[in-house]
Image: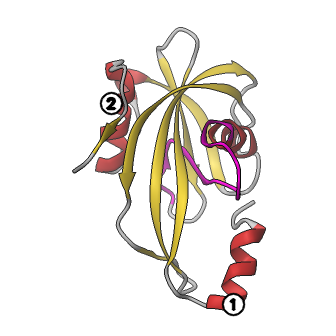
Amino acid sequence: MPTPDFILELREHIGHQELWLTGISAVVLDAARERMLCVRRADSGAWTPVTGILDPGEEPAVAAEREVLEEAGIRCRALRLVDVRTIAPITHPNGDRARYLDLCFLCTHEAGEPHPADGENTEAAWFPLYALPEMNARFREQIAIALSDEPAARFRR
């Protein structure tokens, strides 16, 4: 589901004005911690971890698990919060503006084989940690944090 219904309803009232939303990023590792799940976004062609938007009242870890299942057909379990950051403002191709508080989770694979499950992505696959596809600096940093096994989440001042 590309745009949640609650956002479409809000847009009917506020048009393209900037929305403050909570998003998630899910760094999903296989059980052996040798491979990471990556998806190729349909809108940009970029490889990323699974990302998504929390529904109103939804627990963040539950949202991470839901988004991974919806986008890549994988059941996973969120293990811990690894990073909290504000993403720079985004203007979508239709003119909608948004800014996100991103909560990044380290997750572990429980079941399923990756596939593009909902149309948001054109590919979903496991990649060895030593051969991840090209990604932007934010995702590279979040992956490094997740792999560092630091017990506390990072945040910026």
Q: x and y percent of residue 79 in the render?
A: 55, 22
Look at label 1 and name its amino acid. His
List x then y, in percent, for residue 103. 48, 45
**Quarter occupied by residue 150:** top left
Q: In the rendered view of the protein, which quadrant contains the N terminus?
A: bottom right
Q: Is residue 6 left or right of residue 144?
A: right
Q: Position of residue 102 (x, y in %)?
A: 46, 51
* In this view, 132 is above or below 63: above
Q: Secondary structure at mark 1?
A: helix
Q: Decide which of 46, 143 is in the foreground and name it.
A: 143
What's the residue at 50%, 20% (across, down)? 35
Q: Position of residue 69 (x, y in %)?
A: 73, 38
Looking at the image, residue 5 lies above or below residue 69? below
Which of the labelled discs sits on residue 13, or is there none? Answer: 1
Residue 145 has which mark?
Answer: 2
133, 82: nearer the viewer: 82
Q: Is residue 36 above or below residue 23?
A: above
Mark 1 or mark 2, which has the lower sequence index? 1
**Badge nearest the viewer, 1 or 2:** 1
Q: Is residue 135 visible?
A: no
Q: Residues within 10 Å of mark 1 (few under 14, many from 20)?
A: few
Q: Residue at x 38, y 39 (%)?
A: 83
What range is drawn magenta here? Answer: 45-62
Q: Amino acid at mark 2?
A: Ile
Residue 50 in the magenta stretch? The answer is yes
Q: CA distance from mark 1 to mark 2?
A: 38 Å
| Residue drawn at point x = 69 percent, y = 80 percent | 10
Above or below, 108 against 42 in this view is above
Position of 134 with respect to 9 (left or right) is left
